[in-house]
Amino acid sequence: MFRLSKYLSGIEHLFYPHLCLGCGDDQVNADNYLCITCTHKLPRTDFAAIRDNATEKIFYGRVDIKAGCSLFYFAKDAIVQNLIHHLKYKKQARLGNMLGRMMGKELIQHADFAHIEMLVPLPLFKEREKQRGYNQSQLLCDGISQESGWPVIAGNLIREHKSESQTKKHRGERWKNVKDIFKVTDPTSFKGKHILLVDDVVTTGATLESAATVLHAACVASVSVATLAIATK
């Protein structure tokens, strides 16, 4: 029976190869998205262990962030960009959970994140989430929760208005594009809590700043930020 299963698995791999999203190698386990070599090549930031890191500095003088962390550096045409592209546009929901677990394993090792009480995914506008089939930030939260035990609170912070793509906008335009687009539906459930706000990539931080401002208005005790990646210049 084992030999038959192995044979059938080999036939399936021949016609439907499972390829590494980093290098395209087909010698990768079906449960993984990267081969061992590409996993070791991932550009980790180690920000969780560094105070005043580049993610935290984005928000200086703009909104109060207790702690900030990005797991990887994001660069054009690199492994992390390919991972995020597949997560957002290729219906790779399991990939989001895997990446979230990687974030969780890193965060729980460091004291600055020891007192997190809730994970809050940065919400998508409802029409965009329906088109995509999921919110990638919530998938990351689910993975983080599996490693940390922190509960995921989705649906209380909502995006009321659709915003345009931030990709080609400069910093000032990005802020205007996301100003007043978020709302907390039940402020009492957030009051006095230390919330970890989670997103996939931080660039100028305009969207996260807008969301964090709304959370502070709901009288949270503190807001921290964690992203899968930080965009490099």
Image: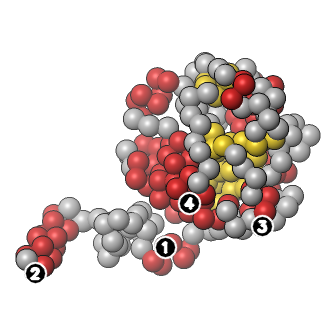
Looking at the rendered structure, the kind of residue marked 2 is Arg
Label 2 belongs to which residue?
Answer: 3
Question: Which image quarter: residue 174?
Answer: top right
**What colour-coding does the image apply?**
secondary structure
Mark 3 to mark 4 CA distance (whole Å): 18 Å
Nearest to the observer: residue 39 or residue 141: 141
Point out the frontmost of discs 4 and 2: 4
The residue lying at 64 percent from left, 34 percent from top is 166
Looking at the rendered structure, the kind of residue marked 3 is Ala
Crowding at mark 3 (Cα within 10 Å: few <14, some 14-19, many 20+): some
Residue 205 point in image, percent of width and height: 74, 41
Q: Earlier in the sequence, mark 1 or mark 4?
A: 1
Q: Earlier in the sequence, mark 2 or mark 1?
A: 2
Point out the frontmost of discs 3 and 1: 3
Nearest to the observer: residue 99 or residue 148: 148
Q: Earlier in the sequence, mark 4 or mark 2?
A: 2
Looking at the rendered structure, the kind of residue marked 4 is Glu
C-beta proximity under 8 Å, tags 3 and 2: no
Label 1 belongs to which residue?
Answer: 38
**Secondary structure at numbered mark 4:** helix
Is residue 76 visible in the rendered structure shown here? no
Label 4 belongs to which residue?
Answer: 147
C-beta proximity under 8 Å, tags 3 and 1: no
Nearest to the observer: residue 143 or residue 50: 143
Mark 1 to mark 4 CA distance (whole Å): 22 Å
Label 3 belongs to which residue?
Answer: 49
